[in-house]
Image (tube, helix red, strand yellow):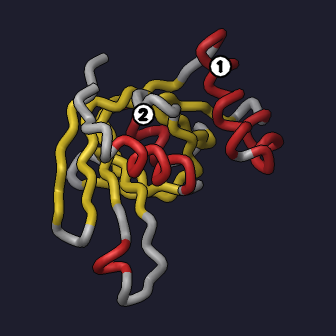
Amino acid sequence: MNIPAEQLPVLQELCRSQPLAALATDAGSHPYVSLVAVAVTDDLHHLYFATPRATRKWANLTRNPRVSLLLDSRTNQVSDFRRAVAATLLGSAQEIDGAAHDEGLMIYLSKHPHLADFVASPTCALFQVQIDRIYLVTRFQNVMEFHLAP
């Protein structure tokens, strides 16, 4: 990982503190954005989210696993232009099962215990995103790009 030491805590805190992210998938002729509950690993290499299989996002992901997710700390105040932090995470999403599912579920439920019944449903899929790249934006216009090695 090539994230500078001074930026790593900023990214980790953003990922730790934000329960939701905007997930962009490929809907064929246009992008499709959904709000999802997320959990990101401390090393920033993986992100987990769950969705019922009867959703557009699930169908989109079966056709094209490439995703973009936006996490941000905005409060919808004018001060956000100076203080808010946003991260765009690019990667590839895969529905997981077996031991990977059990491990991912533990990470996901440690952040979202209130979603235990939702993810326990046989119609719900748990996805793991392998994060390849992160764009971190601070002070509204300071953009840093980080590539994560697999």
Q: Is residue 150 above or below residue 17?
A: above
Asked whether residue 62 appears in the rendered view, the answer is: no
Which badge, 1 or 2, is on the more N-terminal residue? 2
Which residue is at 71% across, 46% downward? 112
- Reading the image, the residue beneath label 2 is 44
Which residue is at 57% across, 41% downward? 39
Which residue is at 31% across, 46% downward? 7
Left or right of 34 on screen, residue 1: left
Q: Secondary structure at mark 1?
A: helix
From the top left corner, tell me how far across and down residue 27 is, in percent: 31, 48
Question: Residue 119's quadrant in the figure?
Answer: top right
Q: Nearer the viewer, residue 1 or 135?
A: 1
Q: Secondary structure at mark 2?
A: loop
Left or right of 47 on screen, residue 91: left
Q: Is residue 109 above or below residue 17?
A: above
Question: Residue 121's quadrant in the figure?
Answer: top right
From the top left corner, tell me how far across and down residue 125 is, in percent: 61, 32
Q: Quadrant of the N terminus?
A: top left
Which residue is at 35% across, 31% downward? 131
From the top left corner, tell me how far across and down residue 63 is, in percent: 34, 31
Front disc: 1 or 2: 2
- Reading the image, the residue beneath label 1 is 103
Could you tell me how many numbered marks the image carries? 2
Q: Residues within 10 Å of mark 2 (few under 14, many from 20)?
A: some
Question: Residue 83's quadrant in the figure?
Answer: bottom left
Q: Amino acid at mark 2?
A: Leu
